[in-house]
Image (cartoon, rainbow, N blue to C red):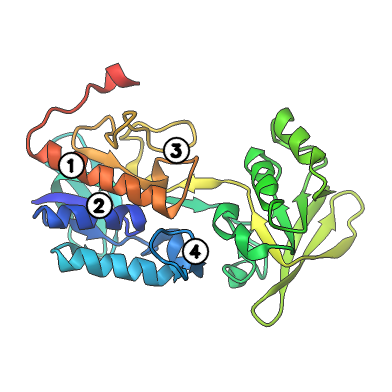
Amino acid sequence: MEKVVILGTGPAGLTAAIYLARANMNPVVIEGTEPGGQLSLTTEVENFPGFIDGVMGPELIENMKKQAAKFGAVFRSGWVTGVDFSEKPYKLKMNGTNDLETEALIISTGATAKMLQIPGEKENIGHGVSTCATCDGFFFRDKKVIIVGGGDSAMEEAGFLSKFASEVEIVHRRDELRASKIMQERAKENEKITWSLNKTPLEVVGEANKVTGLVVKDSETGKEETIKTDGIFIAIGHNPNTDFLAGQIKTDETGYIQVVPGTTETNIPGVYACGDVQDKKYRQAITAAGTGCMAALDVERYLEGSSVQDWSQTL
């Protein structure tokens, strides 16, 4: 039986691993189906503190992993397909490795950005296609970009990008937006934001490792055209990676794990959540790392016998 198992190797899980390994907790880290999480798909990261000239996403993840291993964290390939929280120790059903039992568990499985699933999209991730305006907006200073989406997050990202880009064109497949009225009004009042409604994205066009346009189809006329652009930001939502929990832990209506405010504690004693799997607001590498630190400290206190907060009194 393990003292603590960490699910996920993004910045949240790896930070938790570093802290717990240094505390001689010998954490076992399950790498998951996408080792490194979304950061492993990112090219240059310029907003992670301590890297004056930036750092490549995969390099940052690899360094964090080596740091955790240096202090005694054990990494295992594979992923968890099911859990049993009905009794202690908690049981984890593994795919490709032996099943595990653990006294404590940290869930840092992240959230996956919803994609358009069109040709050229996947190939150009990091080369003009992005799912995070806060992360990559700076690279498009004085350039034209496209936002695909019609919800609040799309309007918010369009406004953010307008601080850098020369033009932000919002592409949405319907003639009506899902965004709240106030968010729509803000976007429409922004002189840098233009609109392409009733347009369905068909293909991302690029050359020489650089996005050059987005092929769209008019939903009414069926006519196709290519909108020229230097970058495409996809803002159609995220899916938290919580399906494997099968309803055994408290989540909100969209599947994000709910934690006791000010902690990383879930409604299951000894089970903690950190990173994007419980954060649908910030979704940054540095905030994920911060909650990873919190989860590690919460686990330490739990394993030392400190009392867990009363869930019913805190939500």
User: Circle 1 sits on which residue?
Assistant: 299
What residue type is disc 2 on? Ala
> Going from the N terminus, do you reach mark 3 or mark 4 first?
4
Q: Nearer the viewer, mark 1 or mark 4?
A: 4
Q: Are marks 1 and 2 in contact (CB under 8 Å)?
A: yes
From mark 1 to mark 2, how far is it between C-alphas? 9 Å
Judge left or right: residue 149 versus residue 110: right
Going by the numbered disc 4, the residue's amino acid type is Glu
Residue nearest the viewer, comparing 299 with 76: 299
Q: Amino acid at mark 3?
A: Gly
Disc 4 from disc 2: Cα separation: 22 Å
Q: Are marks 1 and 4 in contact (CB under 8 Å)?
A: no
| Frontmost residue, 7 versus 137 | 137
CB within 8 Å, label 3 to label 4: no
Residue 252 position in % (x across, y down): 44, 31
Report the residue marked by disc 3: 255
Whether the residues at callouts 2 and 3 have beta carbons within 8 Å, the answer is no
Amino acid at pointer 1 = Val
Q: Quadrant of the C terminus?
A: top left
Q: Earlier in the sequence, mark 2 or mark 3?
A: 2
In the picture of the structure, the residue carrying the numbered disc 4 is 46
Question: Residue reaching furthest front?
Answer: 52
- Residue 67 place in picture, x, y as percent: 23, 66
Q: Residues within 10 Å of mark 3 (few under 14, many from 20)?
A: some
Rendered residue at 21%/25% (across/down):
309
Could you tell which of marks 1 and 4 lies nearer the N-terminus?
Answer: 4
| Vertical position of residue 179 compared to residue 41: above or below | above
- Horizontal and vertical percent for residue 175? 83, 41
Mark 1: few, some, or many residues within 10 Å (few <14, many ≥20)? Answer: many
Indicate which disc residue 16 carries.
2
Please state if 111 lies on the left or on the right of 146 as rendered: left
